[in-house]
Image (tube, grey):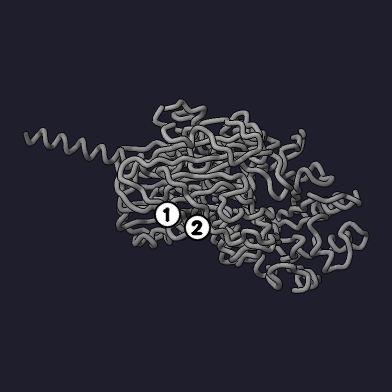
């Protein structure tokens, strides 16, 4: 009997150890992970060892991390230690060719981190910190890892909305933690020029700024920001947009950039920036402008080349040199041989609902490739918040920055993905859905562990199942009633036309057919219904996210009329009762880009409270649509709905 109990106890403990291995959430998931059955512990007597002086920064970062966990570790000490942490630069490592790749082996006696360079050590260190989140018991593991793409970036637009150094550093810290390696800093715009340039004080004068006057980045702050990135092995790309998006320059200097005098000023500005800042990359823009001086961009490129600075530019755009890295921003741009590209097509977070964004970014094939090649270097996600912000931190909420960043970090490091662009999680039990659900589980663990109290507008959505019924032709009458609204319709157990998973269901994207929605062949002037049932263990009030639009942060989108969820007469019933729309703060008011978004989308307004009964609860969505053509480009038709009970 004792032997039987002991055997069962061993089985339970072994099962718990295996469960621990499964629950260790790493983002990005390494290329090769070999979890062991055993666990290790760091409690006392830890020694960090390194020989190469390049690793001093990494060693002290490990030391500081362990100190934050209550563990004191020595560096290059001779004392006998319970656990040794070794950081080693090796000239050759099996299965690793990238200078960002690393080998990590962690067991109860020794943790060894090897890489071809100090950059690789730093990347591996981010995995090690996730592994040691609970150092009193970490999972024994062996990892071989390297990135699929050498450029994995994040861009913020400071020209339109200024952000403090503290907020910028906080975002850079998150980039570093998730192995993003390119910070794209867009600081000049029509609204304001926010880069101090020695010899050109008029550029940053209060009178030239239409928003956040007097807010700009000094030369000393720029040096600090560049150093901050370099310490985290992040390349810093400074964008001085030219010759378009340059109205602030024209107000300050009194000339057009493409004029003879303007060209001379811009060249002097570039020389000043190059001599005052330790800059290696300058993005020259080139987008959304009529080129009247075909010599302008080539002259700027030649100047940067002569100063040893690499140039980037937007594509499509002006007449960029073949040596310039082309950053794609529209799907129509052809990929030409012999040119290096970075992908930012449909990677603008300001156009995405956060639940849609995580799906789209996770499934994305960057540059339509599974991994980098000679022409495709990687991708950069971008935030163009054209509309004024209520406050700088709201930028993280409106654009779903952190959940999106983690999804992009996963995909850009691991590569792969599925062809084309989609807002669809996948079919029930499909390989795509299983992969997404596995990532979502890790994402939500990171939200809980690392983003407590931080803006992170994302909740579990992959298990929320919808049955879709339609299409019902409405002939342009968006109020027309159809069978699913009849009492007893669902008691007949009708077969759905389609099924969908998620908290945000995009029926047809405004960029269809480039982006796939849930309806394969959507038709204008039709109505669809979506139904789900949600089981509740207890009775009571619960917060829910409900919405029928996703307002781009770059457009002057109208607020809905009072009493309506949107302009399409969408509706929602909960347990048979019609759920009223919110009282919109901007309804009927004149909207401009200076009007901050405040309550227009579900994930940044006060949640709707619904009373859940114990057991099954019914949700019925009505989603009519008329024409797919919006009233103007500022008000496109994004046919969608969102419903998600919050945890």
Q: Is residue 129 above or below residue 195?
A: above
Image point (39%, 62%), residue name = 68
Mark nearer the N terminus (2 vs 1): 2
Q: Is residue 364 left or right of residue 615?
A: right
Q: Secondary structure at mark 1?
A: strand
Residue 463 percent across, percent down from the top left = 42, 38
Please say if the residues under marks 2 and 1 sit with CB atoms less than 8 Å apart. no
Foreground: 257 or 476?
A: 476
Q: Which residue is mark 1?
A: 609
Q: Is residue 248 left or right of residue 293?
A: left
In the image, residue 514 above or below residue 123: above
What count of labels does the image hold?
Answer: 2
The residue lying toward the viewer, choosing from 570 and 187, is 570
Q: Secondary structure at mark 2?
A: loop
Q: Which residue is found at the position 42% from the left and 58% from the top?
A: 452
Residue receiving disc 2: 455
Asked whether residue 236 is in view, the answer is: no
Q: Residues within 10 Å of mark 1 (few under 14, many from 20)?
A: some
Distance Cα–Cα, label 2 vs label 1: 21 Å
Q: Position of residue 9 (x, y in %)?
A: 17, 38
Point 57% across, 42% down: residue: 640
Q: Residue 113 in the image: x percent, y percent?
A: 45, 46
Left or right for 241, reference 180: right
Graded by Cα atoms within 10 Å as few (under 14), some (14 to 19) or many (20 or more), the crowding at tag 2 reads: some
Which quarter of the rendered picture does the N terminus lie within?
top left
């Amino acid at each position: 009997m004792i032997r039987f109990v002991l055997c069962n106890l061993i089985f339970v403990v072994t099962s718990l150890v295996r469960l621990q291995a499964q629950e260790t959430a790493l983002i990005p998931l390494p290329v090769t992970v070999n979890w062991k059955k055993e666990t290790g512990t760091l409690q006392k007597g830890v020694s960090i060892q390194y020989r190469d002086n390049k690793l001093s920064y990494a060693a002290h970062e490990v030391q500081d991390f362990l100190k934050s966990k209550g563990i004191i570790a020595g560096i290059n000490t001779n004392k006998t230690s319970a656990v040794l942490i070794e950081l080693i630069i090796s000239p050759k490592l099996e299965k690793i060719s990238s200078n960002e790749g690393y080998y990590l082996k962690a067991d109860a006696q020794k943790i060894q981190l090897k890489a071809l360079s100090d950059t690789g050590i730093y990347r591996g260190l981010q995995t090690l910190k996730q592994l040691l989140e609970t150092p009193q018991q970490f999972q024994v593991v062996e990892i071989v890892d390297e990135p699929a793409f050498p450029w994995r970036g994040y861009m913020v637009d400071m020209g339109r909305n200024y952000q403090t150094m503290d907020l910028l550093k906080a975002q850079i810290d998150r980039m570093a933690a998730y192995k993003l390696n390119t910070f794209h800093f867009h600081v000049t715009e029509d609204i304001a020029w926010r880069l101090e340039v020695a010899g050109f004080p008029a550029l940053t004068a209060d009178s030239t700024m239409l928003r956040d006057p007097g807010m700009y980045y000094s030369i000393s702050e720029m040096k600090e920001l560049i150093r901050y990135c370099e310490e985290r092995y992040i390349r810093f790309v400074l964008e001085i947009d030219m010759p378009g998006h340059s109205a602030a320059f024209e107000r300050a200097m009194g000339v057009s950039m493409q004029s003879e005098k303007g060209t001379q000023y811009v060249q002097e500005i570039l020389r000043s920036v190059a001599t005052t800042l330790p800059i290696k990359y300058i993005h020259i823009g080139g987008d959304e402008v009529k080129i009247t001086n075909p010599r302008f961009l080539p002259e700027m490129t030649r100047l940067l080349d002569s100063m040893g600075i690499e140039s980037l530019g937007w594509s499509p755009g002006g007449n960029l040199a073949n040596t310039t890295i082309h950053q794609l921003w529209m799907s129509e741009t052809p990929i030409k041989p012999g040119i290096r590209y970075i992908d930012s097509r449909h990677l603008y977070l300001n156009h995405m609902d956060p639940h849609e964004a995580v799906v789209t970014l996770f499934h994305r094939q960057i540059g339509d490739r599974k991994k980098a090649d000679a022409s495709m270097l990687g991708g950069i996600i971008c935030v163009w918040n054209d509309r004024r912000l209520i406050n700088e931190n709201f930028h993280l909420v409106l654009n779903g920055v952190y959940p999106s960043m983690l999804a992009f970090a996963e995909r850009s490091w691991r590569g792969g993905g599925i062809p084309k662009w989609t807002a669809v999680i996948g079919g029930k039990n499909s390989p795509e859905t299983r992969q997404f659900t596995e990532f979502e589980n890790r994402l939500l663990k990171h939200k809980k562990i690392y983003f407590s109290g931080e803006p992170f507008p994302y909740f579990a959505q992959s298990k929320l199942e919808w049955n879709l019924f339609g299409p019902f032709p409405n002939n342009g009458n968006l109020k027309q009633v159809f069978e699913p609204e009849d009492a007893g319709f669902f008691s007949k157990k009708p077969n759905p036309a389609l099924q969908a998973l998620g908290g945000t269901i995009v029926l047809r994207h405004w960029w269809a057919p480039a982006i796939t929605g849930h309806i394969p062949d959507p038709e204008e002037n039709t109505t669809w219904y979506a139904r789900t049932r949600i089981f509740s263990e207890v009775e009571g009030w619960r917060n829910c996210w409900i919405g029928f639009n996703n307002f781009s942060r770059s457009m002057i989108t109208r607020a809905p009329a009072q009493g309506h969820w949107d302009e399409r007469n969408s509706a929602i019933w909960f347990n048979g009762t019609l759920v009223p729309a919110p009282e919109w703060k901007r309804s009927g008011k004149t909207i401009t880009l200076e009007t901050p978004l405040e309550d227009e989308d579900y994930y940044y307004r006060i949640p709707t409270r619904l009373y859940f009964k114990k057991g099954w609860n019914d949700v019925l969505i009505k989603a009519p649509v008329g024409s797919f053509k919006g009233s103007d480009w500022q008000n496109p038709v994004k046919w969608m709905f969102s419903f998600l009970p919050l945890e």
